[in-house]
Each structure stands twice: as C-alpha cells, then as structure tokens.
Image (spheres, rainbow, N blue to C red):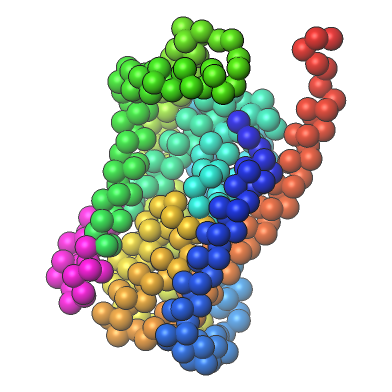
Amino acid sequence: MQDTYQVLRKHKWKILVSFAVAAFLIFVMTFLIGFNDVVSALGKAKWEWVLFNIVLEIGINVVWTLRWKLILDVVDTSPKFTTLLMLLLASLFGNNVTPSAAGGEPLRAYLLKEVEGTPFEIGFASSTADRVFEFLPFVLISIIAALFLLSWNIPPVTRIFVIAMIIASITLFGILIYAGLRKEITQRVIISIARSIYPTAVRLTKKEISFNEISDRIIFYINRFSTGFITALKDRKIFLLAFILSFAMWGFDMLRMYVCFGALGVYPPVLPLVIIYTIGILISLLPLLPGAWGIREATLIGLFAVVGVSADVVMAASLIDRLASYFVPTIIGALAALYYGRKIKNKSVNSPSADS
C-alpha cells in the first residue's frame, strides 16, 4: 500500500490536470454569472457567520471521528480519540487533492496500520462500515429528493444527470455493502479477476509467487474484512449510535449550508435546500474531480434557480461552504499527513531489516 506522498508523486500530472479542469469550470461559471456580482455578494458576507460555519465543520469532524472510534472498538482496539481525528484529517487531505487515486477508506486503513499497527483489513472494514453508516441518511433523503425532482420544473438534461448521479452513488455503496456481507461471492469474483491478471503481473514484477499463495491471501483478507464489517453492522448498540451520529452529521451539514446563505443575507426555503444540498453532497462523493469542484457548483446553481436563488448568490454561498468543508480540513489534513508521513518514514528506517 502506498503512502500519501507516493500517491501524490505518482499521480501528480493527473492531479494537476484535474485541478486545472476544476479551476476552468469555476472560472467559466463565474464569468457567465459575472465576476462583479459574485465578488459583490461575497463582500456583503457576515464574517461571524462564516466563522460559525467553520465551527460547525469542526463539529462534523468530531462526530465523524467518534463514530469511527465506536466501530473500531467493536472490531478491534481503537486508538485514542485525538489520534483518530488526525488520521481521519490526514486521509481527507489525500482524498481531497486526488480525484480517484487515493481513496479515503484504503488510505485511512493504511495510516491506521502504519501508525497504530491495526491490521489493514480490519482498518478497511471499520472505515468502510463507517462510510455505510454515513451513507444511510443520504439514501433516505436521496429517494425523497429524486421524487421531488421529478415534479420540479427543471431542464430534462439536469433532471437526468442528477438522478443518474444518485443512482450511481447508491449503486457504488450497495456494492460495498454486498461485498462485506457475501464474502463467498466476493472471494470468487476477486480470485477470478486475480487469475486473469496473474500472468501479466508476474511477468512485470518478476516475482516468483504461485497463484495458490495469492488465492490464500485473498481469502484470508476477505474473511478478515467481512468478519470486521459484519461485526460492526450487527452490534445493535453500535448500529443505533452510529445511525444517530450519521443523522447528526447530516443535520450539521444542512445547517452549515443554511448558514452559508445566511452569511449573505439570503434565506432559501428549508425543504428545497435540504434536497438540493443533499444531492450536492452525493455528487461530491463521486471521484470525478478533486472534491467534485465545478460539477457540484453547476448542479447547485441549476437546482437553486428553481426556488428563486440567483446564481451569483449560490456561487458565493458555495465558496463560503468550500472554505469550511474543503480548504480548512485539507490544510489541517496536510499538516497531519506531513507529521504521520515523517513518523512512518522514521519507523521504516529504524526498524531492523528482515535479514538481521
């Protein structure tokens, strides 16, 4: 498993291009809306509301860490809360700057393994189960949102695009849940894939390893993953607590977006805001561009227009939202990744070699 720095170095051109595309999309939208209008809207922002928005984002990350800790305490022994919080932010940094190269759950599991010694498959099972709990409120709201969208007067292309994004997100997480619950089928699928690429992989890596060894490792890791995943989901107390915390996070998120508009002196109707912003969060989960920059903004602008909120206000509110939900966690996460990256590197240098 690669660390954050290896991932960033390996995919640096992909990352730069994806950020360039995102910046271009934001530039085009701002140009079409009117730079002066967006700047004027931001100039009217109540900065105490902006600071409150950042406080709410901190609350979301604290609740997120608490939910992950509850799950880890069921499947293994959890590290202390502050360590988990920093590991979570470090993984968010890797996830926020890459469109699809790192992946938050594998990166969290990797950091947990290297820093705390938790087996990778256990860490991955806990972080995947954590994401499942996070996704449950969005599934419920997304179904309601899709029904509302069918009745709204929006362009057919926008309607099809948004509903397609909802279906894609639900399908993706459905596959993850299925993989955790049906380990026999998961084993057969992954072993079948591994068998097809085994000859090429051996030829490229020039390592002498039999397919039976690879198959045994696959079965071992999937069994460990599935056991941890099912244990987390079947513990009724943890399931209830994690479900409540997930709704609390969702509530904080909705309140944050309302505060973003409130900072500009605009107060959109609550029900449409909940539906529209939930769709925006779902689109952000898809690994298209870093943080779905540009794509999410375009979707929000198109949907908020239906309830009478002007594009310049939506763009300004989205930028205020990004300050709290993207830039602040990414900066803190970068510092955490730097700290743990050095710690892992020093640990690797100081550990005795296999031959000694």
Question: Is 258 positioned to the left or the right of 102 in the image?
Answer: left
Q: Residue at x 30, y 49 (%)?
A: 168
Q: Position of residue 32 (x, y in %)?
A: 42, 85
Q: Give the quadrant of the N terminus.
A: top right
Residue 275 makes an appearance in the image: yes
Q: Residue at x 31, y 31 (%)?
A: 178
Q: Position of residue 200 (x, y in %)?
A: 48, 22
Question: Is 238 positioned to the left or the right of 92 in the image?
Answer: left
Q: Position of residue 165 (x, y in %)?
A: 30, 56
Q: Nearer the viewer, residue 267 or 353?
A: 353
Q: Nearer the viewer, residue 37 or 224?
A: 37
Magenta-span inclusion, residue 158: yes
Q: Give the quadrant of the C terminus.
A: top right
- The image shows residue 179, relative to residue 352, as above or below, that is below
Q: Position of residue 3 (x, y in %)?
A: 66, 38
Which region is colored magenta?
139-160
Quadrant in the picture for residue 223: top left
Q: Nearer the viewer, residue 140 or 315?
A: 315
Among all residues in the image, which is located at the extreme left? Answer: 151
Q: How many circles with numbers are drawn on the protein?
A: 0
Quadrant in the picture for residue 237: top left
Quadrant in the picture for residue 320: bottom right
Q: Residue at x 44, y 51 (%)?
A: 287
Q: Nearer the viewer, residue 140 or 297?
A: 297
Magenta-span inclusion, residue 85: no
Main secondary structure found in the magenta portion: helix
Q: Residue at x 26, y 56 (%)?
A: 164
- The image shows residue 74, relative to residue 140, as above or below, that is above
Question: Is 217 positioned to the left or the right of 177 in the image?
Answer: right
Residue 140 makes an appearance in the image: no
